[in-house]
Amino acid sequence: MAWADGDRVGTQSAYHSAIAIELGLKAYLLHRGFSDDWTRVWLRHDLSKALRCVRMLGFQSVPDGIAKLAAVLGPLYGSGALRTGIMPDVPLPPETADQAICNFLSAVEAAIGIDSGPDR
C-alpha cells in the first residue's frame, strides 16, 4: 500500500485501508451511474453499506477479507475515530489486508474497464 513500513500498524494503516476500500466501492458506484452527491448523502463513509450496494449491482469479485475489514473499519472511519488515534482490532494481518485490498481494487478496475497493465 501507499505508506512506509513504520506506518503499517495501527491507526495509520487502518485509516489508509478504509480510504482505499471506500474509493474502490465508490468508483464502481460512479461507473454504474450513481452520482458523487448520491454517495455522499446516502452512503457517507459507511463501507458496509457501500459494499452491499455494489453487490446488489452485480459486483461479485469481492475478495475474502474485504467484508470483515469494512465491518471493523467502517464505523470508526465514518465517525472520524481513525483520524483521532483509535487503534482498531483489524481482523487480518497487515500483509493479508493489503493483498485483499489490492485484489479488490484490481477487480474494480477490471469491472469498470480500466487497464491496470504494466504500462500505467
Image (tube, rainbow, N blue to C red):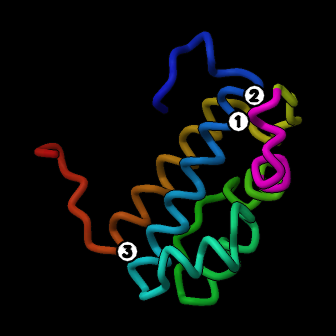
Label 1 close to label 2 by CB (< 8 Å):
yes
Q: Residues within 10 Å of mark 2 (few under 14, many from 20)?
A: many
Q: Residues within 10 Å of mark 3 (few under 14, many from 20)?
A: some
* Left or right placement of residue 32 versus residue 79 in this view: left
| Whole-percent x, y for residue 110 in the image | 33, 68
| Whole-percent x, y for residue 22 in the image | 59, 58
* 33 vs 115, nearest the viewer: 33
Which residue lies under the disc numbered 3? Answer: 111
Q: Is residue 11 above or below residue 38?
A: above
Q: Mark 1 belongs to which amino acid?
A: Ala
The residue that appears at 49% across and 32% down in the rendered structure is 1
Quarter of the image where one finds residue 84: top right
Distance (Cα) linking label 2 and label 3: 30 Å
The residue that appears at 83% across and 51% down in the rendered structure is 79
Q: Nearer the viewer, mark 1 or mark 3?
A: 1
Q: Which residues are magenta?
A: 74-84
Q: Is residue 33 above or below residue 70?
A: below
The residue that appears at 46% across and 73% down in the rendered structure is 28
The residue that appears at 67% across and 56% down in the rendered structure is 66
Name the magenta segment's main secondary structure. helix
Quarter of the image where one finds residue 54: bottom right
* Left or right placement of residue 24 versus residue 94 in this view: left
* 64 vs 81, nearest the viewer: 81
Circle 2: element type: helix
> Is 59 contained in the magenta span?
no
Which residue lies under the disc numbered 2? Answer: 11
Q: Which badge, 1 or 3, comes first in the chain's sequence?
A: 1
Distance (Cα) linking label 1 and label 2: 5 Å
Q: Mark 3 belongs to which amino acid?
A: Ala
| Whole-percent x, y for residue 118 in the image | 16, 43
Which residue lies under the disc numbered 1? Answer: 14
